[in-house]
Image (cartoon, grey):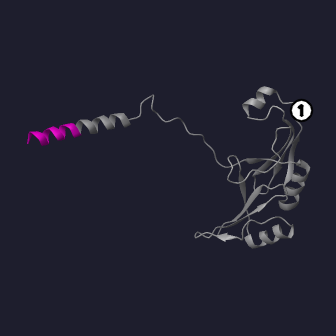
């Protein structure tokens, strides 16, 4: 009986110690969470901003809400934001899409900039998805414009339909239709 009593005492002490360690304290309290509601905009680097503006305006009816040519960017800013020191931000344009979201386009120039679109499995590569009400009609529009379609529309078990296509400069965009 002494062994069982010793084991129970040890288990009780261990449980109490674990409970005490798990209790939040001033030094282990979780930091406050950011309060967000939705995506405001996405940013995309493009090789030719005029062509990209025309592409988004013509394809999805985006409208220009700002067009900025910032001038010289300080070296400290370039370091902080991980830009090549030889780069210059020539221009950035904010486009308004139907529904409220925005796309911000950036055009840089510099000797060290890689002009190739990264592979989609490269770190930093990305895509964004736009909602559409009719996936079949959207596919027809994208194909009629001669854009590269990466996959036939897929329907998930929950009824969501989607496909990817490429912009003229090689960035991926996904179109999604909800059931």
Residue found 86% across the figure and 67% down from its top: 146
Would residue 12 appear left or right of 121 to someone viewing this image? left
Compared with residue 135, is residue 83 higher up or lower down, i.e. above or below? Answer: above
Residue found 88% across the figure and 48% down from its top: 49
Instruction: Tell whether position 6 is magenta.
Output: yes
Residue assigned mark 1: 71
Position in image of residue 103 (x %, y %): 79, 50
Position in image of residue 133 (x %, y %): 73, 68
- Toward the viewer: 151 or 139? 151
Compared with residue 68, is residue 127 higher up or lower down, i.e. above or below? Answer: below
Main SS of the magenta part reads: helix
Compared with residue 168, is residue 156 higher up or lower down, i.e. above or below? Answer: below
- Toward the viewer: 14 or 34? 14
Residue found 90% across the figure and 55% down from its top: 54
Which image quadrant: the N terminus? top left
Which image quadrant: the C terminus? bottom right
């Amino acid at each position: 009986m002494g062994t069982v009593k010793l084991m129970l005492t040890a288990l009780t002490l261990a449980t109490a110690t674990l409970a005490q360690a798990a209790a939040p304290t001033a030094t282990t309290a979780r930091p406050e969470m950011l309060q967000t509601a939705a995506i405001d905009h996405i940013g995309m680097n493009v090789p030719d901003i005029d062509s990209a503006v025309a592409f988004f305006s013509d394809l999805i009816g985006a409208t220009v809400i700002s067009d900025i040519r910032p001038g010289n960017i300080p070296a400290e800013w370039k370091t902080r934001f991980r830009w090549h020191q030889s780069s210059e931000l020539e221009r950035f344009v904010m486009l308004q899409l139907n529904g409220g979201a925005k796309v911000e386009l950036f055009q840089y120039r510099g000797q060290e900039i890689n002009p190739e679109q990264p592979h989609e499995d490269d770190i930093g590569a990305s895509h964004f998805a736009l909602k559409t009400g009719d996936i079949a009609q959207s596919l027809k529009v994208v194909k009629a414009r001669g854009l590269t379609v990466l996959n036939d529309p897929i329907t998930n078990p929950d009824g969501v339909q989607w496909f990817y296509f490429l912009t003229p400069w090689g960035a991926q965009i996904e179109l999604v239709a909800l059931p």
